[in-house]
Amino acid sequence: MPENTVPSADNALLSETVSLRKIGRLERILGPENYRLLKGLLRTPASILGFSLIGLFILIALLAPVLAPPLNPNDPYKIPRDGFSAEPRPMFSEWRRNAPPLPFWWKTVFHSDQWLHILGTSQGQYDVYYGIIWGTRTAFKTGLIVVFSTFLIGVIIGSISAYYGGIVDNVIMRIVDVMLTLPFILAALIMAAVLTPRIGRSLLPSLIALITFGWMGYARIIRGDILSIKERDYVLAARVIGVKDSRILFRHILPNAIFPTLVLASLAIGDVVLSFAALSFLGIGTDIGYADWGQVLSFARNWITSLDRYWYIVIWPGLTLVLFVMGWNLVGDAFRDVLDPRMRGKI
């Protein structure tokens, strides 16, 4: 049909079939479906707030050396200490010894040549502000590593189980059922506690434990979706003409079954960060003084009865953790709504 064809009042069929909606350049580049997904993610207030929070934390993580210059550049995740006193010091108290270098913006903002404990110190005189800033990098690192690893393991195992079926499916799913009966955080705690003396105090014990007990949910979800998709006509046709199983699975089945699992993964990042913080709070994994939000919170355990005076050692790391998890949950909820077929036309 010529581009200059314009529907007229006496041509009802033409007016119903020719779209008058202008297609922008971005939609032409991304395609209609991807454009709809992107538009849906950026239209709801919840998703905008979620992306804003995540963007803020990404900015903090990238600018950590500027916001809180490390005392030792070779070990930036070690929270600097202003002495060894057990009693926390209040917000904006002066740094007495072992002060890190002043950032370039300090004099402009605070009109002072002396480092201050902006958010106070915790037990052992660990600087709360430094722990929160560099703990943002720890949160992203642990969250993304665990979610990517568990997602990959779960998708591979669930896909093999669903595609081949029979005894393969029965054996794999029984293993998954047994592992799902274990309380997640308790199982991860025990495994991390066993691994820590063997491989040393670091991120690895907690990461390995969270990955070991975190992939089963992805396997179950992807298995259910593949069981329904593998019986469709285009999959059966591919089998008839002799296409390899690996090509059928990864080229024709997985792209059509992966979206619910992606939604679960987007929602899981916040849960992983919470679980890692819980292990750090209990003293499992990382060294004492490592920049991690759970570790910063753990320094307040002996002062719970005095939080009317030392509220800042709990409020600031706790609020940071809540906002980080809320950002990922809001984005995950928006992602789920956009991918829901029942929401087509509403977003």
Image: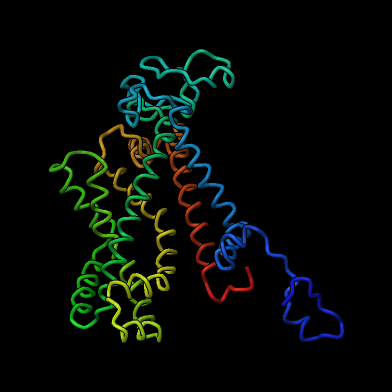
Q: Percent position (x, y) of residue 224?
A: 35, 77
Q: From the viewer's perspective, is 189 left or right of 59?
A: left
Image quadrant for the N terminus? bottom right
* Residue 44 seen in the current view: no
Residue at image x 32%, y 48%? Answer: 276
Give the total number of marks visible in the rendering: 0
Residue farthest to the top, as pictured: 113
Residue farthest to the right, as pictured: 9
Instruction: Please name the colour scheme applied to the rendered image.
Output: rainbow
Specify the quadrant of the image occupied by residue 211: bottom left
* Residue 1 seen in the current view: yes
Residue at image x 82%, y 85%? Answer: 11
* Vertical relation: 82 (above or below) 309: above
Specify the quadrant of the image occupied by residue 318: top left
Residue farthest to the left, as pictured: 198
Image quadrant for the C terminus? bottom right
* Vertical relation: 307 (above or below) 194: above
Q: Percent position (x, y) of residue 149?
A: 30, 56
Q: From the viewer's perspective, is 33 left or right of 138?
A: right
Q: From the viewer's perspective, is 116 left or right of 179?
A: right
Q: Percent position (x, y) of residue 67?
A: 48, 28
Front-most of residues 246 and 98: 246
* Vertical relation: 184 (above or below) 145: below
Q: Percent position (x, y) of residue 64?
A: 44, 32
Residue at image x 47%, y 27%? Answer: 66
Specify the quadrant of the image occupied by residue 148: bottom left
